[in-house]
Amino acid sequence: MSLEKAMDILRKYPLCDHCLGRLFARLGTGLSNEERGRAIKDYLLMRIHEKIISEGLSDELINDLRVLALSGHEPSIKFLRNLSIEVSPTTCYVCGNSIFNRLDEWARNIAESLKSLGVEYRSFRLGSRVPIDVLSRELNITTEFNISSSESIKRELNRELGKRVSSILGVQFSREEPDVETIIDIATGSVTTQVMPIYILTRYRKVHRVVGDRENTRWPIDRVVQAYGAQEAIVHAGGDDPSAARVLGNGRPVVIQVIRPGKRLDIKDISPLLMDPNYDVQLEEPSYVKSSIIMKMKARVRDYVITYRVLAIADDNVTNEAMITLHDYFRNRQVAQRIRHGRRIRRRISMVYELNGSVVRGRLVEFLIKCQGNLYIRGFVHGGFGDVEPSIAGVLGIGVKPVEIDILNITD
Ligand SMILES: [Zn+2]
């Protein structure tokens, strides 16, 4: 990372101030690449001038002056003119002088595209598509001269365009989780824009038993979509509930993804709507989160610890002794499950940590089961036609059918 290299590079490749400055981006913080490139050329000219004074004019020094002049360095062009040598600058090897003079124009186009979205936003992110030949010419130089202090042209473009767009719109540039995103293709000047979704984290409880609940459970989603002026909203839950199960206790984590929102509402304005008790799900105090939370939540599901209450009916009377046997047997017990997807079969192991059973009356029994989040609870009770091993029915040696399932607690 030495400025000495700058002269060597220019001797081989004429570079504009931007493209030269970018190679030494780590030197002189507070300078733009253009200012840095210009400063390097000024410095190189002064060194040549110093040598001319001490050693006299030589072909070698004139040649270096010519190199600077070719790269568009005005003081060097004037210096040579005083020696009656005319040099007109050539185009930059990397950018062809056809990129950085269009920044204002591109920034105006981007700002127009963002305005025409017709949605509210408080931050934007900007990216650019740069022709591959420009990128590879830049890479040639950094590898050939072993330069580790450079910045990529993309970064400079994004920053310079970002600054301009930000000042036109009065909206801040944000690299992480912006409200809208825009990409400019600098080969064609075409601009694409995208409204980023809103992510709301909450937990839901289903206090009523809804038959066919996957289709029939009413969420306040339509009203959320309406409030945001959004296109739609998608519900991402941390795991599935057994059908017709109630979800009680602390509820199940869920992220609501609001697609193409027209408004960026304060969470305080949306909370009452989400927490409206007139729906089948009861949602707790919501908060805005980053998109990455969905991945994290889904990855955690199998390690949830879930407490179920299962009311079941056995084929025969069950004794209290049998319940004690079950309790002792299923203390920290692994349960193997065969999950069938058409012809494919996957094996899954889940832990049952604790099981407490009691006889309600005759053949009617109730179980409290504390287990891993990925246990197929219904199959664990009835045996899943041999696909779940061991199971309650298997250990009891009689048929057992779940009648009601409730989730009492989820530790996520
Ligand atoms: Zn250039």
Image (cartoon, helix red, strand yellow):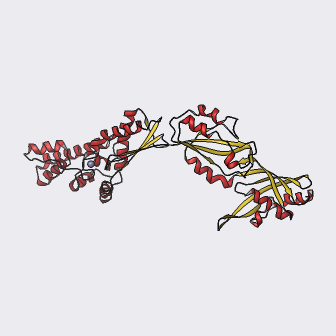
Residue 339 in sight: yes
Task: Say how many tags the image has.
Answer: 0
Does 386 sit left or right of 106 as displayed? right
Q: Is residue 284 left or right of residue 265?
A: right
Instruction: State the image quarter where residue 355 is shown.
Output: bottom right
Who is closer to the viewer here, 142 or 399? 399
User: What residue is shown at x 30% (from left), y 59% (from top)?
Assistant: 144
Q: Nearer the viewer, residue 64 or 251?
A: 251
Residue at the left extreme, as displayed: 84
Q: Residue at x 22, y 43 (%)?
A: 42
- The residue drawn where x is 32% and y is 46% is 189
Left or right: where 119 falls relative to 138: right
**In the rendered image of this protein, does residue 88 appear above or below residue 351?**
above
The picture places residue 26, in percent across and down from the top left corner, at 36, 47
The x and y percentages for residue 267 are 58, 34
Q: Is residue 174 left or right of residue 303?
A: left
As drawn, 354 above or below 270: below
**Res. 412 in view:** no
In the image, 392 versus 410, the foreground residue is: 392
Query: What percent of the width, then of the height, locates residue 369?
Result: 79, 53
Q: Position of residue 13 (x, y in %)?
A: 23, 54
Residue at 64% in and 32% down? 272
Question: Where 394 sits versus 116, above or below?
Answer: below
